[in-house]
């Protein structure tokens, strides 16, 4: 794949038209945090029939699983679970790219609910658990959160995890806190990772994954946290005090345990950052070219100055490189192949750095205007920085890539 097809471009233009009509007029309210993104995302899904496609795909998969005895190994039906398989791969990527040109946080909010929360349930749940919790997430009827990060663990998500679940009779009693949780303040359904409190050394304990519901006794969801950027994606904290969860809320760990479940989600999340980065890069380049054509200094448009041309040229190189990563990912999906953790980490590392650098250069090209919120490169620069932090920092991506290289 070297370019978008005519059908792809029709989809892109339709999504772009919807964004111009529905999202851009609400951009100030989204960026201030005044307007949560969920009703807009539901409108996107209904407008393009994505909710009905998700529902149809879900029921077909569940029927197949029930015919096979309801068994799942965590890998079967992966393309359906991730919502991006076969011929609809571009239908997944194009809305991400177009939304990230305007409000990247909306993609984070959507991606966590669909790819991580629903994705985990679809990979690890029973048919009953999928019908109960995954379907409303896949259709955007409900908001999902994926809770793994803790205040004292950071990048050491597994080893430093302190949230626990203790078996008491037929139930588990869960205690602990999570932070930096996308959709946390508004989530209806929460996929929660913790360690089994069985007396072993904390670092040796099994990782368990539960599905929790808003309003459960002992579960507190904070107000949205204030942060540097990505304001259209509400982020919060979770506090659990003696939350009682039955075995029906425990997702199967599969043969590899809860850690493997989380790692599969890291692959999905990190690979998706390339599409998000492409949206930011394309928009920054577009705005920068327009500004370079119209802004004049000393009687000349600034695009005639070589240093400005250098900035534009580097932006275009970044755009081409990240677009090629996205095209490669689409081809892998169509071939039924998922990237390895190292491949996904490499995609994220390069794309995140490229988006942040392009956005910062766009601010510099705009000069004083670029530092003003009236000129949208200011918001995009704040939002792009988050790509280098969430889903694993740049430094963590380097570690995963290098470990893979050294293990060969």
Image (cartoon, grey):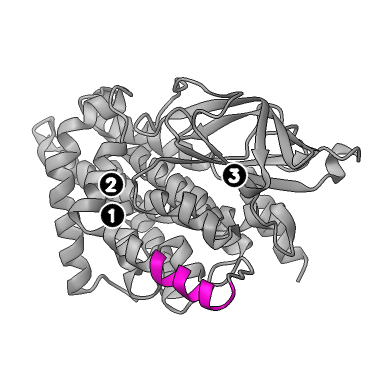
Residue 358 horizontal side relative to residue 144, left or right: left
Label 1 sits on a secondary structure element that is helix
Question: Would you identify the image quadrant in which residue 93 lies?
Answer: bottom left
Q: Identify which residue is drawn at 55% across, 29% down.
A: 216
Q: Is residue 63 above or below residue 299?
A: below
| Residue beneath disc 2 | 99
Q: Identify which residue is drawn at 67% across, 57% down.
A: 252
- Rounded to the nearest angstrom, the CA distance separating label 3 from label 2 is 22 Å
Residue 1 or 46: which is nearer the viewer? 46
Label disc, if present, on residue 359 of the rendered structure: none
Badge 1 or badge 3: first in the primary sequence: 1
Q: Main secondary structure of the magenta part?
A: helix
In this view, the mark in front (1 or 3)? 1
Label disc, if present, on residue 95 of the rendered structure: 1
Residue 128 horizontal side relative to residue 262, left or right: left
Region rendered in magenta: 58-69
Label 2 sits on a secondary structure element that is helix
Quick check: can you spot residue 120? yes
Quick check: can you spot residue 313? no
Asked if the stretch drawn in magenta spans residue 248, the answer is no
- Rounded to the nearest angstrom, the CA distance separating label 1 from label 2 is 6 Å
| Disc 2 crowd, CA 10 A, few/some/many (<14, 14-19, 20+) | many
Label total for image: 3
The picture places residue 374, in percent across and down from the top left corner, at 20, 25
Q: Is residue 178 above or below residue 397?
A: above
Residue 76 horizontal side relative to residue 106, left or right: right
Label disc, if present, on residue 392 of the rendered structure: 3
**Mark 1–mark 2 CB contact (< 8 Å):** yes
The picture places residue 401, in percent across and down from the top left corner, at 66, 58
């Amino acid at each position: 794949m070297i370019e978008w097809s005519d059908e792809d471009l029709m989809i892109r233009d339709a999504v772009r038209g919807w964004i111009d009509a529905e999202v851009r007029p609400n951009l100030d309210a989204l960026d201030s945090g005044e307007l949560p993104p969920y009703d807009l995302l539901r409108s996107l899904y209904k407008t393009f029939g994505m909710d009905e496609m998700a529902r149809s795909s879900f029921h077909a998969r569940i029927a197949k699983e029930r015919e096979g005895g309801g068994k799942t190994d965590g890998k079967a039906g992966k393309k359906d679970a991730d919502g991006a398989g076969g011929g609809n791969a571009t239908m997944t990527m194009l809305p991400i790219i177009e939304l990230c040109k305007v409000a990247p946080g909306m993609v984070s909010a959507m991606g966590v609910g669909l790819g991580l929360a629903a994705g985990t349930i679809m990979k690890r749940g029973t048919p009953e658990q999928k019908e109960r919790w995954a379907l409303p997430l896949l259709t955007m009827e409900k908001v999902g959160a994926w809770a793994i990060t803790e205040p004292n663990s950071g990048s050491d998500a597994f080893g430093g995890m302190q949230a626990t679940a203790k078996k008491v009779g037929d139930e588990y009693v869960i205690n602990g806190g999570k932070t930096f949780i996308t959709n946390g303040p508004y989530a209806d359904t929460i996929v929660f990772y913790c360690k089994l409190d069985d007396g072993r050394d904390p670092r040796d304990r099994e990782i368990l994954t539960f599905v929790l519901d808003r309003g459960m006794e002992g579960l507190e969801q904070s107000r949205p946290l204030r942060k540097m950027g990505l304001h259209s994606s509400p982020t919060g904290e979770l506090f659990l005090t003696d939350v009682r969860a039955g075995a029906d809320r425990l997702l199967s760990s599969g043969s590899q345990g809860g850690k493997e479940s989380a790692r599969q989600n890291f692959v999905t999340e990190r690979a998706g950052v390339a599409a998000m980065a492409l949206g930011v890069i394309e928009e920054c380049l577009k705005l920068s070219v327009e500004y370079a054509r119209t802004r004049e200094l000393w009687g000349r448009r600034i695009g005639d100055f070589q240093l400005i041309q250098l900035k534009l040229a580097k932006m275009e190189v970044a755009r081409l490189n990240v677009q090629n990563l996205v095209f490669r990912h689409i081809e892998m999906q169509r071939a039924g192949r998922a990237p390895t953790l190292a491949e996904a980490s490499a995609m994220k590392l390069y794309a995140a750095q490229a988006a942040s650098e392009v956005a910062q250069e766009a601010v510099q090209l705009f000069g004083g205007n670029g530092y003003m919120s009236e000129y949208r490169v200011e918001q995009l620069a704040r939002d792009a920085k988050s790509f280098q932090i969430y889903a694993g920092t740049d430094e963590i991506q380097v570690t995963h890539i290098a470990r893979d290289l050294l293990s060969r």
